[in-house]
Image (spheres, helix red, strand yellow):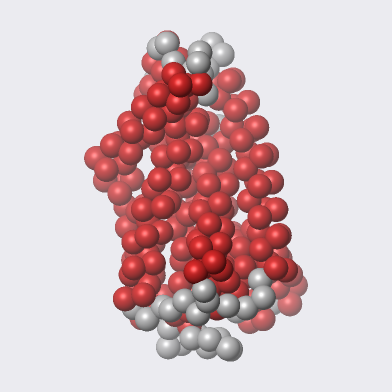
Amino acid sequence: MTPLLALRDFNGVAKRNLLRSVRTPQMILYLVQPVMMLILFRYMFGGAIKVSGTTYVNFVVPAIFLLAGLIGAMTSAIGIADDLKSGMIDRFRSMPMSRSAFLAGRSLTDLIKSIITLAVLVGLGVAVGFRFHAGVGPVLLGLLLVLAFGYAFSWVMAAIGLSSKDPESAQNAATGPVFLLLFASNAIVPAETLPGWLQGFARNQPLGVTTSAVRALFEGHDAANYVWPSLGWSVGITAVFFAISLALYQKATAH
C-alpha cells in the first residue's frame, strides 16, 4: 500500500473516531471533566492551599492542562475496548486498508482532541485569573510539552484498551494510573507538603516533572532541569507503549 493510501486510511479512522466522540455522551463527559476540575480547584481550593512564589491559580492551572491529557487519553482505552467487543476491529481488518491505520488513526484523534481541549482550557484559565509570565517561545514549548505528555499516555491507554475485555474493564483499569499520577505528585499541592518518603517520587514521576517544567516555562524561570526529563518520559513512554500496543493489536487481529 502506498503512503498516500495509508494516510487516507489514517484520516478516515481519525474522522470516524472524532465523530463518535461527539455523538457519544460518555466520551463528551471526559472532555467536560477538565473544565469542571479547573473551576473546582480554582474557586473551591484556591483559598485553602498556599504556595510560595506564585498564586494558586498559576500553580494549579498548568497541572489541569496535563490532567486533561490524561483524562482525554482514557477515552482511547474505552473506545478501543468497545471496538474490540463489538467486532469493529475485525471489520476494519477485513477491509482493504492499512493494518496500522486503526492505531495511527486513534493516536491522531487523541492529538486533535488534546489540541482542542487545551485551547479551551487556556481561554478558561485566563478568564479565571491565570496568567503567563514568559515570552512566546517558552509558552509554546510548555504547551508542546503538555501535548507530548497527553500523546504519550494515549499509547498507554491504547494498550489498556487492547488488553481489556469490555469498556467497563478498560475504564476501571485506566483510572488507576491516572489517580496514582495525580495524587502522588506536585500537581495539586506543593511536593513539600507530602510525606518525606513520597516527595522524591512526586517530583520525578512523569506528571510531576512535566508539571514542574510547564510551570517554570510559563513563569519565565529556568526550566532546563525539568524540560529534558519531561521529554525523556514522554518519548520513552511513547516508544514502549507503542510497541506494546502494536503487539497487542496484532494478537487481537491474528485470528
Q: Position of residue 106 (x, y in %)?
A: 45, 35
Q: Quadrant of the C terminus?
A: top right
Q: Above or below — where is 70 with respect to 190?
A: above
Query: In terms of depth relative to the viewer, which is nearer, 78 or 109?
Result: 109
Res 186 seen here:
no
The quadrant where residue 81 appears: top left
Of 149 and 1, the residue lying toward us: 1
Q: Is residue 207 left or right of residue 128?
A: right
| x 51%, y 63%: residue | 140
Side of 196 where 237 appears, left or right: left
The percent position of residue 230, horizontal first and vertical second, equals 66, 59
Whether residue 139 can be seen here: yes
Instruction: Pick whichever, 106 or 192, lies toward us.
Output: 106
Q: Residue furthest front?
A: 136
Who's the residue at 44% across and 43% down the image? 110
Q: Nearer the viewer, residue 139 or 15?
A: 139
Q: Answer above or below: position of 199 versus 28.
A: below
- Residue 189 appears in which quarter of the rendering? bottom right
Horizontal arrangement in the rendering, residue 99 relative to residue 242 (left or right): left
Looking at the picture, how far across and down is residue 58, in whole percent? 48, 79
For the image, the number of numbered tags is 0
